[in-house]
Image (spheres, grey):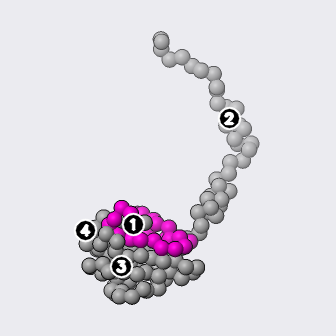
Amino acid sequence: MKWLRLESQRYPLRQGETTIGRSPYCSVQLMSLQASREHAAISVSGDITTLTDLASRNGTFVNGRRITSPTRLFIGDKIAIGGLELVLFESATIPDAAASTQDNLAIPAAVLETTLAAVDPSPRRVGKL
């Protein structure tokens, strides 16, 4: 799955269109006065990812070059909008990664049973009621 990274935030790029801009209605909301309300759009169709500037005032840049027509994106491309930098990256799907993590964190039954047996379930009183 392809993603956009903006500082510590991650945004999934699903099939179809992802809008970018200041508007709260955009899929990726930018907190920059230099970004237009609806600044740009990323379209994902199969394996092809395309970035389009939506007639923004300050432009959209890919790897330092201003785009003026729909531009194909590749993993590692840097998108500059309103003084902010977004990076396109790809990672394993969440369900696959989660399944792998669950397998790696599995606690053997013997350890779990020993730990549970050591816990004293009887209530203890502390002070007067």
**In front here: 4 or 22?**
22
Instruction: Identify the residue at image location x=74%, y=42%.
Output: 110
Instruction: Identify the residue at image location x=54%, y=17%.
Output: 125
Inter-mark Cα distance, 1 to 3: 12 Å
Does residue 2 appear anywhere in the picture? no
Instruction: Identify the residue at image location x=32%, y=80%.
Output: 55
SS state under label 3: loop
Magenta range = 1-26
Inter-mark Cα distance, 4 to 3: 16 Å
Residue identified by numbered label 4? 33
Mark nearer the N terminus (1 vs 2): 1
Inter-mark Cα distance, 4 to 1: 15 Å
Where residue 31 sits, quadrant-wise, is bottom left
Mark nearer the N terminus (2 vs 3): 3
Query: With 106 as the anchor, is 129 left or right in this view?
Result: left
Residue identified by numbered label 3? 54
Mark nearer the N terminus (4 vs 1): 1
Residue identified by numbered label 2? 116
Residue identified by numbered label 1? 26
The stretch drawn in magenta includes residue 124: no
